[in-house]
Every structure is written in structure tokens, then in C-alpha cells.
């Protein structure tokens, strides 16, 4: 009797509508979390953009296109990503080289590529997904934890695009790409002593790395420790963002009632510093609500990784969860004055098309892992 009951409520005997829903949305829990995050994000963006409906509509269209890409990628078997990831990686690296030759210059960096009829885009965003997929494809059929040679090869796969991105210069995106590839290595079982050794090497090389940074990058790091030393220059962003968050208190001033962003005291309010808008207008409660949604998304990613039976799927799903957490952590730390300003947007909330499309494509791959977790 119990067996009959289980069979009755199983997915295989549901109505046609239920089966169609599950086929279209492989993981409704993750999809709901993403839709709630994007909906709240558009609401805050409306205020950050001074109620410019056209720009909010533009962002909504980009998010809609991203959802379509997500649904398409969710129905491609992970073995296809395993097979084609290296080709996407090589194509992305070639585009990064092309950016350095003929890329568009904006805001002091040469990061954009304009290929005629195609919309202008940042090739570095493609590598956020291509790098972890390629590292996972290299490691999936090798002995884990990885040996010395496999670690060196993996680091080479990660380092080539990271160096090309950093010289654009785009340190923030370079760090995110490096973290995405590093997450795969970590999940593959890289020994802790190797991680500690790598940290020691970076610390020892810090003086040399410091001399290779641009003047404005050095100033950002120095300003982190004493923003008041240059309140009208490098320290302006941190001072204004922390002022906005602090002025919101517990419940905030109310949506559309913020002053720091609406009077243009807060720079990049619609992109890198949109969390400060949330803090000012929705208060600590609003910030905590957003962070809770992010936490639930990360936990869902890790749950999908644990459900996966293939090594490649586990590495990909787990790295997506860790990398997404790093995105949020870096942006929150940057806006709160705990980390240097490195130009990392708040995922799926900040204004921007390329970043949103890449993130949603990444979640499409994650849903593919969930959908085909048993075969």
C-alpha cells in the first residue's frame, strides 16, 4: 500500500501540466529565488535611475533575454558543456586579445568589443563561465585530488585570461574569473597546505605586485584604510556609500525617498553602489532581505552540487555557488568600506546587460546539471 502511495505522488504520474512545468522549469525553487531577486532589483533600480522608465525597461528586457538563454541552456545535457567548454574558452581568450588591439575605451579601460551588427559587449564576462567549465572538463577524468602537474595545467588555464583581463585594466573582473577557476580546484580536493603555500607566495610577492598596479588602483587600496585622507577624491565613493547606508537606519527612508543617490552624492548608484541605495531607502531590513535571497541561492547551488553523481557536474555546480557568493561578498565589502573599490556589480540587481546575461547563462548551466543529475 505504501509503495502504491509513493508511486501515486511520484513525478512520473503527475498531470500533463505538471510534467510540462517541471520540464520547462527544472528547479522551480531556484527559478523563484532568481525571479524574486530580479523583481526587487528592478524596483530599487527604478529609484537609483531617478525614475527613468526607459532605462528600467531596457534592463528588464536584458533580464528577459537572459531568462530565455537560461531556459535554453538548462535543457542541454552537461556532457555537451564538457565537450565544448574548451572551444568557448579559446574563443573567449582570442576575443580578449582582440579587445587589447581594437577594443573600445570607456572609463579609462579598454574592455569592450564592438563587432558591427552585434551589441557592444565585454568578452571578459564570457570567461567567468568558460574558465570554470574548462578547468572542470580538464579535471573530471583525472585522479582527484589533483597532482602537481594537473594543478599547474589548471592554473595555466586560469592565468591566461586573468592576465589579459587585468591589463585592460579590469582588476575586479580578473579577480572574479580567477576565483571561479580557483573554486573548481578547491572543490577538486586541492590540499590545504597548497592553498596556504599559495597564500604565502602571494604575500611575499605583494611588494612586486604593488609596483605593477596603476596609480588609481594603489590609491583605492590606500583609501580603504583612510578614506578621509582624500574626501573629495578617491575617498568620495566609500564616504558617500557608508553615509547612505548609515542614514537608512533600520527601516530606511522609503523607496524613492533617498537623498544620497537622488541628489547625485552617491557615484555609480545604479551599478557598483546600488546596495547603498538599498540601505538608504529600505534600511537594514531591506539589505538583510536581499542578502537572505542571495544566501538561499548559494545554498541551492551547493545542494544541486551534492545531488550530482558525476564529477564534472559536482565541480561545475559547486564552483557556480562559490563564485556567486564571492560576487556578493566583494560587492558588499566594497560598498561598506571593508574592501577596495574594484568595480564589481551586485549580481542581477546592478544595471548592466553583459553581466546579467552571463550570470543567467551560468544558472542555465546549473539547472542543466540539476535536470540531468541522474543520467
Image (tube, grey):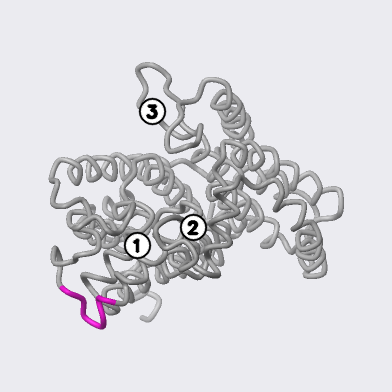
Give the label on residue 61, or none. none
Q: Nearer the viewer, mark 2 or mark 1?
A: 2
Q: Is residue 340 left or right of 242 when viewed as pictured? A: right
Q: Residue 188's spot in the image, x, y percent?
A: 71, 59
Mark 3 — residue?
A: 120
Q: Residues within 10 Å of mark 1 (few under 14, many from 20)?
A: few
- The dominant secondary structure in magenta is loop
Q: Say which residue appears at 36% left-offset and 58% top-offset.
A: 273
Q: Say which residue appears at 46% left-offset and 29% top-offset.
A: 105
Mark 1 — residue?
A: 11
Mark 2 — residue?
A: 341
Q: Say which residue appears at 50% left-offset and 62% top-offset.
A: 330
Placement of the N terminus among the 4 image quadrants: bottom left
Q: Residue 152's spot in the image, x, y percent?
A: 81, 47
Helix or strand or loop: what does disc 1 sit on?
helix
Q: Residues within 10 Å of mark 3 (few under 14, many from 20)?
A: some
Q: Give the range drawn in magenta.
A: 247-253
Cβ atoms under marks 2 and 1 closer than 8 Å: no
Q: How far apart are marks 3 and 1 (CA)?
A: 43 Å
Helix or strand or loop: what does disc 3 sit on?
loop
Amino acid at each position: 500500500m505504501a509503495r502504491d502511495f509513493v508511486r501515486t505522488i511520484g513525478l512520473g504520474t503527475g498531470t500533463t501540466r505538471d510534467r510540462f512545468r517541471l520540464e520547462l522549469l527544472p528547479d522551480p525553487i531556484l527559478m523563484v529565488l532568481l525571479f524574486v531577486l530580479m523583481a526587487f532589483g528592478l524596483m530599487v533600480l527604478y529609484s537609483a535611475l531617478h525614475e527613468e522608465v526607459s532605462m528600467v525597461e531596457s534592463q528588464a528586457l536584458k533580464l528577459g533575454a537572459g531568462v530565455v538563454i537560461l531556459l535554453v541552456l538548462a535543457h542541454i545535457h552537461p556532457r555537451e558543456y564538457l565537450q565544448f567548454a574548451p572551444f568557448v574558452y579559446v574563443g573567449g581568450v582570442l576575443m580578449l586579445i582582440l579587445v587589447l588591439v581594437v577594443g573600445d575605451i570607456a572609463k579609462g579601460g579598454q574592455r569592450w568589443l564592438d563587432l558591427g551588427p552585434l551589441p557592444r559587449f565585454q568578452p571578459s564576462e564570457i570567461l567567468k563561465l568558460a574558465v570554470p567549465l574548462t578547468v572542470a572538463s580538464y579535471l573530471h577524468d583525472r585522479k582527484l585530488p589533483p597532482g602537481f602537474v594537473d594543478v599547474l595545467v589548471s592554473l595555466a588555464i586560469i592565468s591566461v585570461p586573468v592576465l589579459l583581463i587585468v591589463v585592460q585594466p579590469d582588476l575586479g573582473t580578473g579577480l572574479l574569473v580567477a576565483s571561479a577557476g580557483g573554486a573548481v580546484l578547491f572543490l577538486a580536493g586541492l590540499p590545504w597546505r597548497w592553498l596556504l603555500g599559495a597564500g604565502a607566495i602571494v604575500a611575499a610577492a605583494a611588494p612586486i605586485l604593488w609596483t605593477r598596479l596603476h596609480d588609481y588602483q594603489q590609491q583605492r587600496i590606500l583609501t580603504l584604510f583612510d578614506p578621509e585622507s582624500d574626501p573629495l577624491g578617491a575617498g568620495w565613493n566609500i564616504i558617500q556609500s557608508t553615509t547612505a547606508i548609515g542614514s537608512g537606519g533600520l527601516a530606511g527612508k522609503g523607496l524613492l525617498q533617498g537623498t544620497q543617490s537622488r541628489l547625485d552624492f552617491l557615484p555609480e548608484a545604479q551599478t557598483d553602489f546600488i546596495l547603498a541605495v538599498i540601505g538608504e531607502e529600505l534600511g537594514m531590513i531591506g539589505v538583510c532581505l536581499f542578502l537572505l535571497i542571495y544566501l538561499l541561492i548559494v545554498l541551492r547551488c551547493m545542494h544541486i552540487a551534492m545531488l550530482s553523481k558525476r564529477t564534472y557536474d559536482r565541480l561545475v555546480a559547486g564552483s557556480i555557488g562559490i563564485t556567486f557568493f564571492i560576487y556578493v561578498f566583494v560587492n558588499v565589502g566594497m560598498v561598506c568600506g571593508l574592501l577596495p573599490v574594484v568595480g564589481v556589480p551586485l549580481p542581477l540587481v546592478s544595471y548592466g546587460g553583459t553581466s546579467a546575461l552571463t550570470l543567467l547563462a551560468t544558472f542555465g548551466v546549473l539547472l542543466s546539471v540539476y535536470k540531468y543529475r541522474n543520467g
